[in-house]
Amino acid sequence: SQTRSVDTNLGLPNVVSRKNLRCQQCFALLPDCNRGTLTATRPRFVAMRAEDVQKTVLVPIANGSEEMEAVIVVDVLRRAGAEVTLASVEASREVLCSRGVKLVADELLSDVTGSKFDMICLPGGMPGAERLRDCAALEAMMREQVDTGKMLSAICATPAVFLQAKGFMKGESVIEERVVVDGLLTTSRGPGTAFEFALSLVSQLYGEEKMREVASPMVMPK
């Protein structure tokens, strides 16, 4: 059954479920107590902070992708709490990276083309960058990312080989610094800047405080 109470803040009647009523004498939830005056308990809503909301990131890989860049980005973002999907653009989830390291992706890219991501992050390496560039499904996802105002990021060869070649980025200067954030696009140089790159992505997704929280136990230079 239900009873009617008055919101003391707004002066408006609102209906509350009887199962949420408490006795004012012993504060027991009904029907555990039926001997006191009834008062309605109301749910408390706490606003979620941006850093508490799990972000989703797609990291596509191909045969010839740079293994350090792919793994460092995935690892650091997962430490921050992001849901990262490592997706192969090949016919198999297993890819052979540029230095002979084999990685097994979480998914085939073809299985996640209908999914939405807060960020798409492209590792470099050759010929991996070319294979990412030549994947029509990935290009379509990237264009939708731009159209919907979502973040893109790329490191090493991929900014020039993929982003510039396909018109996602203009200007050689964009890839000359260790890490460059230009609006919704982040670029970086190579394996030696991968940690800085990944931590910058954490900062953009979750804020500076989360970035420092992730960097500290990894003993990153301040």
Image (cartoon, rainbow, N blue to C red):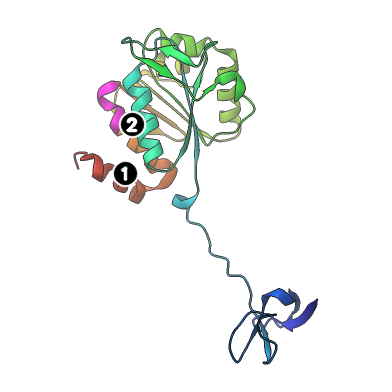
Task: Give the magenta range.
Answer: 191-195
Up the image or down, 214 lies above or below 72; here it is below
Closest to the observer, 160 or 71 = 71
Up the image or down, 131 lies above or below 69; here it is above
Q: Separation of disc 2 and disc 1 at Cα?
A: 13 Å
193 part of magenta stretch: yes
61 part of magenta stretch: no
**Residue 200 drawn at (x, y percent):** 35, 37
**Residue 67 drawn at (x, y percent):** 34, 18
* Residue 201 visible in image: no
Tag 2 residue: 197
Tag 1 residue: 214
Q: Residue at x 22, y 39 (%)?
A: 220
* Residue neighbourhood size for the residue with mark 1, other residues' Cα within 10 Å, grouped as few (<14), some (14–19), many (≥20): many
Q: Residue at x 36, y 13 (%)?
A: 125
In the structure shown, which secondary structural element does the residue marked by tag 1 occupy?
A: helix
Where on the picture, by quarter, is residue 31? bottom right
**Residue 207 drawn at (x, y percent):** 39, 48
- In the shown orientation, is residue 117 left or right of residue 72? right
Q: Which three-letter amino acid code belongs to the residue tagged 2? A: Phe
In the structure shown, which secondary structural element does the residue marked by tag 2 occupy?
A: helix
**Residue 60 drawn at (x, y percent):** 48, 21
**What's the magenta bit mostly, secondary-structure-wise?**
helix
Numbered badge on residue 120: none
Q: Which three-letter amino acid code belongs to the residue tagged 1? A: Val
Classify the position of the N terminus by image quarter. bottom right
* Residue neighbourhood size for the residue with mark 2, other residues' Cα within 10 Å, grouped as few (<14), some (14–19), many (≥20): many
- In the shown orientation, is residue 19 left or right of residue 196? right
